Amino acid sequence: MSYAAYSSMILDYNVDKIRALNVERDARLAALKTEEDAENYVKNVREKIAAIFDIPQQRSIPEVKICGVAEKNGFIIEKIIYYSRKNFPVTANLYRPATPGKHPAVLFVCGHSNNGKMEKNYQLCGSNLARKGYVVLVLDPIAQGERKQYEGIPEAAELNRSCTKTHATLGKQLRLCGEYFGSWRAYDAICGLDYLLTRPEVDPSRVGITGNSGGGTMTTFVQALDPRFTMAAPSCYVTSWQRNIENEVIADAEQMPPNILASGCEMGDFILAYAPRPIILLGQKQDFFDERGLRETWARAQKVYKLLGAEENLRYFIGPTYHGYSIENREAMYSFFNKHANVDADGKEFADSEILPEAEINCTASGQVMTGFPESFTVFDLIQQKAAELKAARKKLTPAELKSFLKEYLQIPANISEPYVRMLRTLYFKQDESYLIHSRFGIETEPGIMTTLKVLCDTAYSSLPAFDDLHIYVPHLDSASEITAMKLPITQRIAGFDCRNMGESRANTCYSVEEYNFFQTPHGQDYHYDCLNDMYGTSTVAKRVFDLLTMLVYVKACGVKKITLSARGLGVVPAVIAALISDDIAEITLYDAPASWESMTAKPATIWPQSCMIPGILKYTDLPEIYEAVKAEKLLNIVNFADEPTPEHAF
């Protein structure tokens, strides 16, 4: 029933924003003329990145357990568990040369392989580097390898089978608590570096980091957070966020740093954070991470490296194949590290390299830390603890204080101007033997964003009349189909309002065209565009609240005397916040309302999408407090709460 008049709007809006950002960034880079200019630029982006990740600078050496040793052809594998947090184990393999003496070291961070460090190409990197004379620590990321997060939890079995689904779920729950999943991943890696540098075999003046895909991401990020690395080789991640946005590339939770675009940084600024550190950017010709963006990022960064007198330190290599740490890319990494670590070895891979079975180099007898070390915490355990701590420390706000806080926290302007409005084509929907007439008004809430108000009438209107009363419905997904399914008699004037990325402006991109896909994948278009909002320092909720408040300005300007509101599912959060902020709403009714944001952190497999969540909100308030504040000032009717949203439109 949805009429997707503006289905490309959200994509176009974000493309325009990132292009404008890069015009400004290019101007800043063009203004660099001297070595001092370049040094100041490097220092500035390093500080911005450090503020976003907020890694503790004071750390103790991680507690470590060595669980076994395997001797191989020319190298040794130690099976290691270290703790990046109390009772939070990280499983890892340490590959080291069999020969004594000081050796260069490499921290290897794995990509999105469900088997983590056991993935064959990652084993090949570890063993080949060790045979060339490096000490290599290969660690399992959260939810991968021996660090699955939902062992023995039936309702989360699907999450446990997919590390990316786990990351998306943990990412949105951490987000509610004001934390960033990428920081957790980066902290695990930096604690691994802390341990690696305690090893007597390691020469701390020669330390590299590498990884592919999600590991390429963490290589890019972690090397920008720590001065101890002397070289880096991210593979199959570096492109530009402009290319990712233009190409509709959805990324994992840790790959979308909050506020990074708001700070004016592009992906290439991570490469520059410790310039002129030697870095080789590895890509693939057929990668979904666009190799054109890699070349563009390299070219922009080269200007800074040139001003610093170290052009040769920044290289790139594009492999001939698809996404993955192919032999071509691995050998490019070996050669680059050999050069900058002064290792007398060639860059070729050993022909007799072997892939070992999991049982031989697993750190735990059971294959999972959660069953092998039952005293260990999962990220989900720590999220629940954090949510409880925030609730206990929260100050109770009066309705007036809560209203003022939300306006500031969501960056709602003190005064909202009357918007530009288009009179759109009237639509007719057949219902039984008659037709529902939708008089449509396109409300431009900001440049590039068109929202739609659809008034159900027995006659068509070209302009919104000065009704005595108007009831406005904010949908779960699409106002036209949901109102039609409700079969409401037109006893009062009813309108549906589609905020951005709902109904008529719902994106038809990023694998989520049909309603049944909307909640089945954690990496759909709704997630993607909410992550982009987060990167710009805002949220989907904040933007939708602004849409609603702007629409109310228009409706009041048309002379409507009394406005009531109802909302369902995903429409509830922006609608109830708008009702609290606005004095123009007399009454609001909620269907299928989320009980609380805290409840979304209380179960491991919540499918409420992060587009109904506000970053860091649990530090300050929760939905029951907002419901209570609205009820104190106007009529509030909550018909029912929903533990989980459903894709069906009918109530």
Image (cartoon, grey):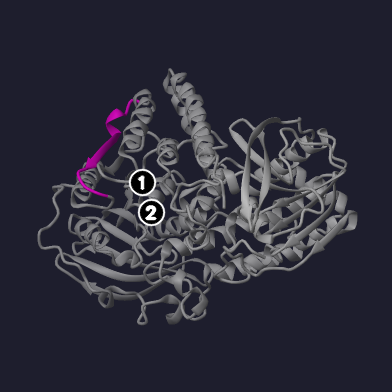
Q: Start and end of the magenta stretch?
A: 309-322
Counting residues from the start of the chain, the first of labels 2 and 1 encountered is: 2
Q: Position of residue 598 (x, y in %)?
A: 68, 65
Q: Is residue 268 above or below residue 597?
A: above
Residue nearest the observer in this picture, 473 or 127: 473
Q: Position of residue 602 (x, y in %)?
A: 63, 70
Which residue lies under the disc numbered 1?
237
Residue drawn at (51%, 31%) of the image: 16
Which circle marks residue 113 in the picture? none
Instruction: Determine whether, in the image, residue 575 is placed left or right of residue 527.
Output: right
Residue nearest the observer in this picture, 220 or 522: 522
Residue drawn at (33%, 49%) of the image: 207
Whether 316 is among the magenta residues is: yes
Residue drawn at (70%, 55%) of the image: 573
Instruction: Determine whether, in the image, residue 78 is placed left or right of residue 390.
Output: left
Determine if residue 468 is in view: yes
Q: Position of residue 383 (x, y in %)?
A: 60, 66
Furthest toward the front, the residue is 433
Determine if residue 501 is in view: no
The kind of residue on which mark 2 rests is Gly
Which circle marks residue 214 in the picture? 2
Q: Residues within 10 Å of mark 2 (few under 14, many from 20)?
A: many
Badge 1 marks a residue whose secondary structure is loop
**2 and 1 marks in contact (CB < 8 Å):** yes
The kind of residue on which mark 1 rests is Tyr
